């Protein structure tokens, strides 16, 4: 499932594998787990894992504020592509 892959990627890439504190609703930007540059790494990860291309219009703090929000973005973009 994508959300699990996303959580693992964030934990490995930005938390030295410390996933025990990372929940789906953890505020990624507010807690400085990811920053504006990291969002572009996440966009690449999304494309690699799902084939979804995230447009510049979709790259904003709200869509990348938590794992749940990133997952919702991916689901919405996948539905729009159908």
Image (tube, rainbow, N blue to C red):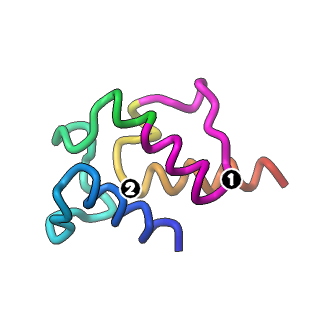
Q: Residue at x 32, y 55 (%)?
A: 10
Sooner in the amino-acid sequence: mark 1 or mark 2 = 1
Q: Secondary structure at mark 2?
A: helix
- Residue matched to label 2: 67
Residue 80 versus residue 22 in the image, above or below: above
Q: Secondary structure at mark 1?
A: loop
Give coordinates of residue 33: x percent, y percent.
Answer: 21, 44
Q: Quadrant of residue 26?
A: bottom left
Left or right, 67 with respect to 26, comes to right
Q: Residue at x 35, y 63 (%)?
A: 7
- Label 1 and label 2: CA atoms lie apart by 18 Å
Left or right, 48 with respect to 21, comes to right
Q: Quadrant of residue 34?
A: top left
- Residue matched to label 1: 51
Query: Which numbered disc covers residue 66?
Result: none
Q: Residue at x 30, y 58 (%)?
A: 25
Report the mark closest to the observer, 1 or 2.
1
Q: Residue at x 63, y 58 (%)?
A: 50
Residue 8 versus residue 46 in the image, above or below: below
Is 58 within the magenta?
yes
Q: Nearer the viewer, residue 58 or 17?
A: 17
The quadrant of the picture occupied by the C terminus is bottom right
Give coordinates of residue 45: x percent, y percent.
Answer: 50, 50
**In this picture, which residue range is highlighted in magenta?**
41-60
Number of numbered discs visible in the structure rendering: 2
Give coordinates of residue 70: x percent, y percent.
Answer: 47, 50
Residue 76 versus residue 36 in the image, above or below: below
Per the picture, the main secondary structure of the magenta-coloured stretch is helix
Give coordinates of residue 60: x percent, y percent.
Answer: 46, 29
Judge the density around disc 1: few (<14), some (14-19), many (≥20) Cα neighbours within 10 Å.
few
């Amino acid at each position: 499932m994508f959300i699990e892959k996303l959580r693992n990627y964030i934990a490995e890439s930005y938390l030295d594998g410390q996933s025990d504190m990372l929940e789906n609703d953890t505020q990624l930007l507010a807690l400085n787990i990811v920053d504006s540059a990291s969002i572009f790494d996440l966009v690449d990860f999304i494309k690699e894992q799902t084939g979804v291309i995230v447009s510049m219009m979709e790259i904003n703090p709200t869509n990348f504020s938590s794992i749940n929000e990133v997952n919702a973005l991916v689901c919405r973009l996948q539905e729009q592509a159908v």
